[in-house]
Amino acid sequence: MSRFWSYGLEGAEKMTHRLLTLVISGVVVIVFGSAVGAHLRVQETTPKADSTISDSPRHLQVWFTQSPDPAVSLLSLEGPTGDISLSETMVKDDKSLMATLPMALSSGSYIVRWRTAGNDGHTQRGEFSFTMTAAN
Ligand SMILES: [Cu+2]
């Protein structure tokens, strides 16, 4: 009886070990798979992420590593007093999204949010901030 149980436990342990190995390799594939390439990434932004500027930008632009899908592409801007309406988001030939600002920005912190999709068609979102200071 005790022999049977110890054998059973050993089997279960082996099974658990195999399952764990499977799960871990699955995670490795997911993590490395996405890091290596399917998704687009931000390459550059205007204004620069985390920058502090005194001249109000005339437009926002985000460059990506893949061509943004126009169907799901959107830029939005949130300022100290809420959302600021932008022009329609344009998809440019240089793998960027651009939207113009209707007016000069006052001082404060701003968050630019983007939504788009790259080659694999999956919608991705991201954001970056910048700060406006009063001109001297
Ligand atoms: Cu994807």
Image (cartoon, helix red, strand yellow):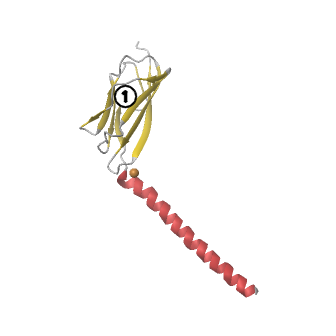
Q: Residues within 10 Å of mark 1 (few under 14, many from 20)?
A: many
Report x, y in % for residue 78: 46, 26
**Residue at left offset 60%, top offset 77%:** 14
Badge 1 element: loop
Q: Residue at x 31, y 39 (%)?
A: 70
Q: 59 or 124: nearer the eye?
A: 124
Measuring 39% from the left and 48% from the top, which residue is drawn there?
A: 122
Q: Quadrant of residue 129?
A: top left
Quarter of the figure with residue 92? top left
- The quarter of the picture where residue 60 lies is top left
Q: Looking at this rendering, what residue extends furthest in the top direction?
A: 136
Where, quadrant-wise, is the N terminus in this rendering? bottom right
Furthest residue toward right: 1
Q: Which residue is mark 1?
A: 47
Whether 22 is drawn above or below 50: the answer is below
Q: Residue at x 35, y 46 (%)?
A: 40
Work out which residue is located at the far left of the displayed protein and give it. Answer: 93
Quadrant containing the C terminus in the rendered view: top left
Q: Position of residue 85 (x, y in %)?
A: 40, 23
Q: Is residue 68 left or right of residue 34?
A: left
Expressed as whole percent of the image width and height from the top left, the position of residue 97 reads: 32, 34
48 left or right of 12 in image: left
User: For disc 1, does the CB lie below 8 Å from ligand 1?
Assistant: no
Q: At label 1, which amino acid type do we have?
A: Pro
Q: Is residue 50 above or below residue 58?
A: below
Q: Residue 108, how many percent across, how many down?
A: 48, 20
Q: Give the number of callouts.
A: 1
